[in-house]
Every structure is written in C-alpha cells, then in structure tokens.
Image (spheres, helix red, strand yellow):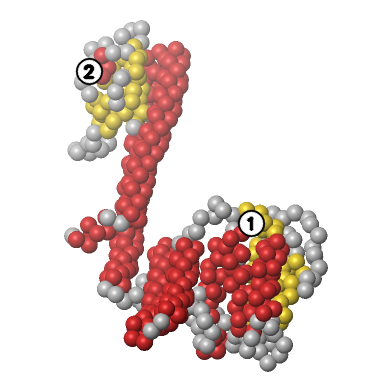
Amino acid sequence: MSRFSAMMKMTAVRLSALYLILFTICALVLVFYMTSLSVRLLTAQTETAVNEEIESIGQSYERGGIAGLVRSIDRRGSQPGAYLYLVTDPAGRIVAGNVQSIEIGVLQNEGWIERPITYERYGEGNDPKVHTAIARVIVMPNGIRVMVGRDLGEPEQVRLVVRRALMAALGIMGVGAFLIWFFVGRRALHRIDEVSVASQRIMGGDLAGRLPVSGSGDEFDRLSENLNGMLARIQELNEGVRHVSDNIAHDLKTPLTRMHNRAESALANAKSTKAWRVAMEGMISDSDQLIRTFNAILMISRLESGYSTEAMEQIALSAIAEDVFELYEPSAEEAGVKFMLGPLDTAPVKANRELIGQTISNLVDNAIKYARGSENPVEVTLSVARQDDKIKVIVADNGPGIPQDQMERATERFVRLEDSRSQPGSGLGLSLAKAVMKLHGGTLELADNAPGLRAVLVFPVGRTVDEPQNRGDKR
C-alpha cells in the first residue's frame, strides 16, 4: 500500500491516471452517442418502412376489400424477415396476422404507438419469447383494426454489439494501462530510490558521489546529469576554497612572521630613532603587502560572484595600453628592461576602464619583474591587435617564461611557481586577470613566446566603429 501511495505521488503517474480517466470518459460519451444515433437512424428508417408497408396494404384493401387485405397480410406475414401484422374485428378478435399475442390495450388507439410494445410470435413452441417492436395502428371504415409493426431486434442488436465492443476495449485498455503503470511506475520508483540513496550519501559528506545515470536519455537521466554537473562544480569550488585557505595560511604566514621578528628585534636591539624608523618602515612595507594581497582576494571574490557591469563603457583598449606604457616606461628603463609599445588597434570594446587598466598593469609588472632573470637582453612588448571578431591585448617578454604544463596552474590563486619564489608577490596577478576577463566575456591565454611568456587578454569585439587600425610603434 505504501508503494502504491508513493506511486500516486509521482507526477508522471498522476498524469497517466488523469489521461486514462479522461480518455475513458470521452470514449464512453462517444460510444453512447454513436450508439444512440445509430439506433435513432434505424428506428427512423423502420418507421418509414412501416408507413410504406401500410400504404401498400391500403392499396390491397381498396382492390380486394377485407378478403384481399387478409390474403395480402397472410402472404406478407409468411415471408422471411416479415413485418408484424395483426388484423382484428371490431370486437377485438384476431382475424389474421403473424402475431400470437400482444399487450392489452395496444389496439385501442389509432396511429403510432408511443412506446415499444411487447409481443409473442407464432411458431416458438410452448415457451415463447417476449419481443419488442414499434407499430402503427389504422382503423378501417368498417371498424376493423390493422396493426403493422417492425421488430426492434436489429437496433437492439446494434446497441448490444457496440456496448460489448466498448466493454472489451475498455477492459483491454484498463489492463494495458495497469500493466504499463505498474512496470513504468515500479521502474521510476526504483530510480528515485537510487537517487535518494545517492543524495543521502552526498549529504553525508561524500562530495565525490554522483547520481546514477541509466543511459536511456530520459528526464531522469537529464536531471541526474545536470545535478552531477552541479555537484562537480560544487566539489571544484570546495577544492578551490580548501586550496585557497591553505595558500592564504602559507603565504601570509611569512610576512606576519617577518613583522613579528622585526618588532621583537626593534624592542630588543634598537637604540636610536633611526633604528626604530628602519624597523617601522619594514613593518609598514610588510603590512602594505598584506593589504595588497587582501585587496586582490576581495577583488577576485567580487568578480567571481558577479561584479556590477554598470561601470562598463565603450572604450578603446589602445588608449588604456598607452596609459600603462607611460606609467611603466620609467620603471622599466630604471630596471634595465627595454619596454616597447607595438601596433595598437583602436576598435572599441565594452569594458570597465579601471579593471582593464589594473589587469594590463599586472601583466606588464609581472613581465618586467620576471624578465630580469633572462640571459638575453630584456625586452617587454605591449600591443593591441584585432583578429576576426576578437580584440587581443598582448604582453610579451623574452624572460624565462612558464613551462607548458604549468600554464593552467599558474592562473590559480596563490600559485607561485618555483622559479618565482625569489620574487616578491602573492601569486594573485594572473588569477585576478582571469577573473576580470571572465567578467568581460573574454579569456586569458598564456603561450610560449620562445623564449619568454606571451600573455593575451582576448575580448569579444561586440559593436565597433571603423577607425584607423594601427597607430604605429612607440619606443
């Protein structure tokens, strides 16, 4: 009973039951309507035939009188499938006909009898059957009454056949519906039980668990696949949170420890205002690094959770690239890095100027910082190029670069490759760039510059205006 109740709670089973009930009602109404219509048509045809038969008998009476009428009725009544005939004298005694007995009072009124009458036929032995018929009574001028009728066996036969066919069809349909309901509902219940068990296991902490997929491609499989995709994403986010937590604890421990050690050293050893000042400046530098790290974390979180796009506008990336070039050209020259501005495509894109400026600055800063270790003359190039329906901001250097198998990992939060451990930083620059590009509907691509690294910000063009493509090279 509990399984039946559970099945009845399923939407598919309820809909199937409702459709079955609706179909049954429609079938019953249609069949009864067609049966009734068929019977009415047969009855109307019978009445027409009876009227024609009465006219024919009337002609026999006109030609031969009572004797001719009786002979005509005897001849007609003995034929196969004959009509019902009955002739009585004014006293009500049967004179001729093929009816053995009839309801009392039927012959009292002239015209069509309002309801079907019952009668018994000749030749049915000692156990005659009661039949029904429709009849019309006419009264002759001499008081003789003549009844002509037609048995209702044919319309009733039609009604009976249709009803039997209906009951058989409904019975077969009901059995088939029950079997389909039972097996389909049972299979659905089994799959729901499997999903319930898997869900309980996942809620118990097994985030690697997945909902079962049968491979049939039905709605259960589609739902399971979507939920499995959601679970995979949740697991990925949880892993990311765990890694971020570990990396935060690891990367923030060093500046905090350094600040603590400097404070202790200043308290123990500083004897002059200058010594105190040096210690405080070092602590301020470390605290600035911590603030920058936390600001980067907050910015990435805001971007990944849906940063507001209200501040976006149609801007030319070439203008932002020129501003970054002017900002970093002095520091690059001081560091001995040849910083060049390549071709600049002026097609505009819809973007947030502040975020894009910060992202390009981070890429240029990384390129200048990590290119110093190169054995070749240090060069960094910033350019903006258009390719089909994409606008690309390219920052290329000839430094040590990133190994091909480490490029995807380098965009994760707090990831710092072994070659970059000696450089200051938090490992959030590429992660922030990736989040900014995701907000703009673009991507961050890292490639080998042979030698060095080629970092590319890829923007969708959207609506652009025709402007001169290249503004030339700046050195």
Q: Residue furthest bottom?
A: 375
Q: Residue furthest top?
A: 141
Front tag of 2 and 1: 1
Count of marks overlaid on the render: 2
Q: x%, y% of residue 314? A: 66, 54
Please give left or right for residue 275 compared with residue 98 in the image: right
Image quarter where the C terminus lies is bottom right
Is residue 435 or residue 341 the one in the foreground? 341
Q: Which residue is mark 2?
A: 105
| Residue 20 visible here | no
Please give left or right for residue 200 compared with residue 138 in the image: left
Occupied quadrant, residue 373:
bottom right
Residue positioned 34% across, 42% down in the render:
25
Is residue 344 or residue 376 the one in the foreground? 376
| Residue 199 visible here | yes
Q: x%, y% of residue 413? A: 47, 76
Q: Residue furthest front?
A: 272
Going by the numbered disc 2, the residue's amino acid type is Gly
Occupied quadrant, residue 103:
top left
Q: x%, y% of residue 100? A: 25, 28
Compared with 161, 323 (above or below) is below
Is residue 199 or residue 26 the one in the foreground? 199
**Label located before the other in sequence (2 or 1):** 2
Q: Which residue is mark 1?
A: 350
